Image (spheres, grey):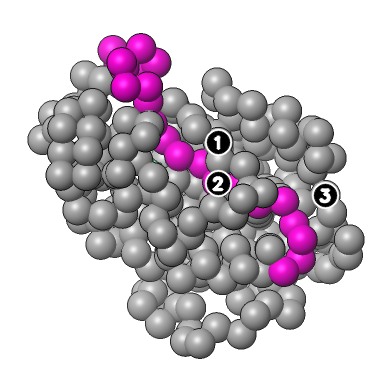
Amino acid sequence: MSQFTLDAKPYPLVIDTGQTALIIIDMQRDFLELGGFGESLGNDVSLLRSAIRPCQEILQWARDCGMLVLHTREGHRPDLSDVTPAKLNRGDPSLRIGSEGPMGRILIRGEYGHDIIPELAPGDREPVIDKPGKGAFYQTDLQLILASRGISTLLVCGVTTEVCVHTTVREANDRGFRCVVMAEACASYFPHFHRTGLEMIAAQGGIFGWVASVDALPSRTAPTSKSTSNTDPSLIAIED
Ligand code: TIU
């Protein structure tokens, strides 16, 4: 267990690695690869790939620290019994949840497209939280797992910034967790939503939490190439 001060917006905070968990939100093929849920909604899925390398870096850093790491996956039972009509019938997607796509049935647990991308494959001792909603606390045992481990702070990354990352951070904030969103390890199909989503978290003295850069983490494993090389720097910067 160790402590360090993390440079973050709106102000630095002390992180105790024994009371902190990394949670990686929904880095699934269904959101990041062609033929999945994200593309079915009309999105350019390539926009999410900037988050992969920073997520790999923070994942390796957390593992090196011995920190609890959790992964989440959005998805549903094959019989669709846990999908509300409001979610199933939302919008005008090219393929609805449960439809057969090139990576298997869209957003269905156990399908190829539902799984986490191989670059961020969960380790054996890293819980995977399967969630039916956008937030990672809704209808899951995440809060129980965090309480059992004495976790009070979450480092949050993944996709998409303004949907599942934001929803999870808001849920966590109301449950008393300190949340630090790792800026370049998140991404959105809408770059301006990513930027604004980060600004919203750190605004008003940190209304939902903090925002930090992966580069601010101490003594992390040196990357072979710069994490931000394929990232527009404006997606990381938070205005003072
Ligand atoms: N559509 C979109 O931006 N996101 C989602 O539907 N789920 C997550 O953010 N994981």
**Label 2 belongs to which residue?**
71
The span from disc 2 to disc 1 (Cα, nearest Å) is 6 Å
Q: Quadrant of the N terminus?
A: bottom right
- Most extreme residue toward the left, as rendered? 94
Q: CA distance from mark 3 to mark 1?
A: 19 Å
Is the CB–ligand 1 distance for label 3 below 8 Å?
Answer: no
Residues in magenta, as a range: 64-87
Closer to the chain start, of discs 3 and 1, is 3
Q: Out of 32 and 127, give the one closest to the viewer.
A: 127
Residue visible at 31% across and 17% down?
80
18 up-or-down from 52: above or below: above
Mark 3 or mark 1: which is in front?
A: 1
In the image, residue 194 above or below residue 178: below
| The quarter of the displayed image where residue 118 is located | bottom left
Identify which residue is drawn at 65% across, 80% down.
221
In the image, what residue occupies the spot 62% across and 42% down? 127
Q: Nearer the viewer, mark 3 or mark 2?
A: 2
Quickly name the residue at label 3.
19
Q: Are marks 2 and 1 in contact (CB under 8 Å)?
A: yes
Nearest the camera: 239 or 8? 8
Rendered-image quadrant of the C terminus = bottom right
